[in-house]
Amino acid sequence: MMASATMARPSLTSNDTAVLQALFDAESSPSSGVTIDPRLPSWPATVLISHDDLGTLKTLEVEIVRELQPDKNPSVESVQDAVHKLDSIVQRYPSYPSAYTNRAQTLRMLVDLQSNEISNTNANEGSLDTLFTPEATDLVTRIFNDLSQAIDLVKPISPVNPVSPVQARLLADAYTHRGYIVLKAARIKKNHNNGDSEIDNLNVGPQRLWGFEADQLEEMASRDFFLGGQYGNKVAQQLAVQTNPYAKMCGAIVKEALRKEMTGS
């Protein structure tokens, strides 16, 4: 018999309620631990670049990125040229975080373009994830390292420290992009362990992820998505909940309880 609706409910503390809400509601808590202060300079003091140089660099980056817009149908050569220009910025201004994230995005375009060229000559390659082919290992390692370097340059010393809107936007994008790469690595690793992967050699993808188990990678991705969500990325907020091991565990418990409620077993 179905339980009565008047059955006594367990008493939850305010902390228990907050934890459950945070686990299951992606919109409930992201950004609650982050203070974004528009009065702050765009970049923290660790970015050792003069105000004039920052203006020049921003203009140069806009010009580089504009040439890579989809309507311009960029070629492999034009994307490689953009990477070289960003390389020059990084070499001259190694503490400039935006150059790293822009280079990561540009390298990602290069991976996709080169993968398309390979798939045109080898139809079997088209079914593999473009980031996790042996040919892409060096590039995706650079992407991962660039995202990590950008995060390290601008993340606050403590989560309670306020950040500027520019700083928050970069952290949101970089954490989300890195989390996506780590999550793809986790799923490929899991598929390989289940015998479903077409990749025989697991030494593909970012070199810093080699040696981690699938569950470890998924937890790392969940952490990145959580932080990306805290800094304002809506997609990361949703993915943080989907990959949170505690949320999945609690979700399984709730599903089983509902099944028993419906079946009376």
Image (cartoon, rainbow, N blue to C red):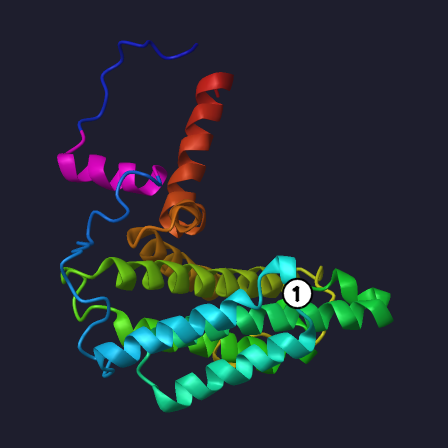
Residue 214 visible in the picture: no
> Left of 3 or right of it: where is 127?
right
From the image, tell me which residue sits under label 1. 192
Quadrant showing the N terminus: top left
Q: Residue at x 38, y 40 (%)?
A: 250
**Residue 162 location, quadrant:** bottom left
Residue 172, position in %: x, y? 35, 58
Element at badge 1? helix
Three-letter amino acid code at disc 1? His
Residue 163, position in %: x, y? 20, 61
Foreground pick, 12 / 70: 70
Q: Residue at x 21, y 38 (%)?
A: 18
Dot 1, crowdedness within 10 Å: few (<14), some or many (≥20)?
some
Q: Which residues are magenta?
A: 12-25
Count of marks overlaid on the render = 1
| Residue 242 part of the magenta-drawn span | no
117 shown above or below 215: below
